Image: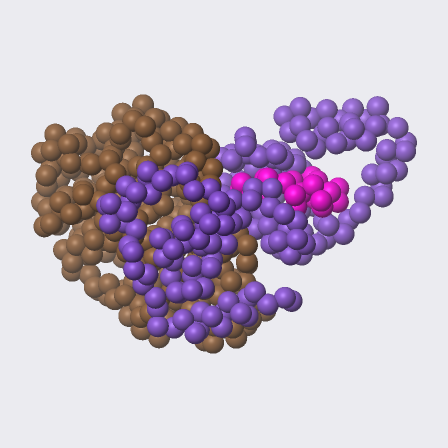
Chain colours: A purple, B brown
Amino acid sequence: MSYRLYGFVTQPFRVDLRMEEIKLETVTSVGKVDSSFLEEATKKSGEDLSLCYQCLKCTAGCPTAPYMDIRPNNIIRMIQMGMKREVLGSSAIWLCVSCETCGTRCPNKIDIGVLMDALREMAIKEGVPAREKNIHLLHEAFVQSIRRGGRVHEATMLIDYKLRSKDFMTDLIPGMMLFLKGKIPLLPSFIKGREEIKRIFERCTKEK
Amino acid sequence: MRFSFFPGCTDHSTSLEYGLSTHAVFKTLGVELVEIEDWNCCGAAATHSINHLLSLCLPARNISKAQSSQAGPLVVPCAGCFNMLKRTEHVLKNDEAERKEIEEIVGFTYQPSLEILALMDVILNRIGLEKVQEKVKKPLKGLKLACYYGCALVRHPKITQLDDPENPQYLDRLMKSLGAEPVEWSYKIDCCGADLALTYGEVVKKLVGRIVSMAKEAGAQCIVTSCGLCQANLEMRQEIGLPIFYFTELMGVAFDVEKRDGWWKKHMISPKPLLESMGLV
C-alpha cells in the first residue's frame, strides 16, 4: 500500500492517490512520518514548507524539471514525508539553476530556489555524494578560484574543474574559440586584499 | 552625475565588449563611473549553491568598498553580480542577526543608504530616456529585435525590485527610444541555463535553442540582452546564427561612438553583416 503513496510523490503529472485503497496501517504509518527533516529544512532555508498545496506551478515553470529525477513540487512533498535520503541524494537539487521562476510564481511564497541552496548545503554537510558530481565539482572549482585570487580566473578555474572531473574532452572547441577571441585571459587579476578574502573564507567554511 | 561602479569578473573576460561599450556609452552621456577599489568576485551562483554565508560575505566586502568610496549609488552591469549584491542587501536590511554576523566577518558597518542599481535602471530612471534620445545620431530604424531579460535581473522580484517579473519592459522601452522595433514574444524571461553550460551541455542546448528559435519566429533579426552569461551562452549554444547584442552595444551604435569594430570582433556570431545590411556600421 505504501507503493500508492510513493506513486503519488514520484509521478507528478498523474496524481493517483485513491484514498479508498489505503488501508488503515498505511494511514498509521503516515501518522508516524518523521518530521525532523521537515523541521531541519524549514529552519535552514527559512521557508515555510508546510504551506505547499501541490499546485505544481513551480514544476510547470522550471526549465530543468524535465531532466530532474524528482520534480520541485515533489521535493517539497518528500521533505514533508521525511524522505531525507532520497531528497539529499537526488539529481534535482543539483540541476536547479536558481533561476527563481518557481519562487516568483509560488502562490504560498515558498522560495524553492533558496530551499534548493539549503538542501545542497545539507547534502554536503551530511556527506551525501552529489548525484550530479560534475555540477558540484564545477561549483567547488569556481569557489576555490575566488579563494586563491579574490576574483575568478577562468583559465585556472577550468583546468582545475577538468582535473577534478577528469572530463577533458567536453567543450574543447568553444573553450579554444573563447581563448582565441581574447576572452580567457592567461594572467589572473589578483586583488590586493587577498588576506581579507582568506579570512572571510576561513570564517565561512568553519564547522558550526 | 557620478556613480560607483562594480565591473565584475567577466568584464575582463567573457563579456569584454559589454564593459567596453558601457564605458563608451557613459562617456557620451557625460556620466562618470568610478570603479570601486580592489573589488572582489561576487561569488556568483557557485557560492550560493554550496555556502550560504560565504555568498553573503563576498558581496558584502564590495558593499563596504562602495560605502567608503562615497562615489554615489553602486552600479552593477552584470545581471549575476547585481543579483548577488541585491541578495546580500536584502539580508543586511531585513535580518538583524545575519547582518551582525556578516558585518563582524567582513569588518564593516552597513549603511542602508547605499543604493545598489542595475546598469539598465540607471539609464532609464536616473539618466532618463530623454537624455538618451538627445544623443541618438543614427536611429536603429527598422531593426527588429527580441529583448531578452533572463533570470537574474528580474527574479526574485522581492530581491531585485526591478520591473515586472513576468513581462518586463525596461529593455523594450530603451530600444524603442533608440528607434528600434522590439518584437512581442513569450520567452523574454525564460532561463537559458547558463549555470549548466559546462556540465550539462545537451540540456543547455535545448533551452538556448528554444529561446533563439522563438525570437526568430517572432520576427527578430537579433536578440538584445543585459547579462554577460546569457549573451555568451546564447551565442555559443545556438545553431541558427542569430546575433546577440548587449544593450550598451546598440546604444553605442545609435550614439555613433568610435572604435566599435573592436566590440564586434569579440562576438562568436559577428553582428557586422546585420548592421551593414541596416546601414548601421
Residue name at image x 50 percent, y 54 percent: A140
Q: Residue B8 appears in which quarter of the rendering? A: bottom left
Q: Is residue A92 magenta?
A: yes
The answer to whether A203 appears left or right of B179 in the picture is right
Residue closer to the observer: A16 or B233: B233
Boundaries of the magenta span = A75-96
Residue B139 on the magenta span: no
Position in image of residue A150 (x %, y %): 40, 65
Give coordinates of residue B87: x percent, y percent: 47, 57
Can residue B130 be seen? no
B60 or A169: nearer the viewer: A169
Q: Which residue is rendered at x = 60% and y = 46% of the image? A: A130
Does residue B34 appear to the left or right of A21 in the view shown? left
Magenta highlight: main SS: helix
User: How far across and how far down the image is residue B95, in percent?
Assistant: 56, 64
Which residue is at 35% across, 72% downward? A192
The quarter of the rendered structure image containing the N terminus of chain A is top right
Q: Position of residue B70 (x, y in %)?
A: 31, 73
Q: In the rendered image of this protein, does residue A42 appear above or below residue A17? A: below
Q: Residue furthest right?
A: A24
Q: Is residue B9 visible?
A: yes
A20 shown above or below A88: above
Residue A208, compared with residue A135, is above or below; it is below
> Which residue is drawn at the image coordinates 85% and 41% (left, top)?
A31
Q: Which quadrant is home to the C terminus of chain A?
A: bottom right
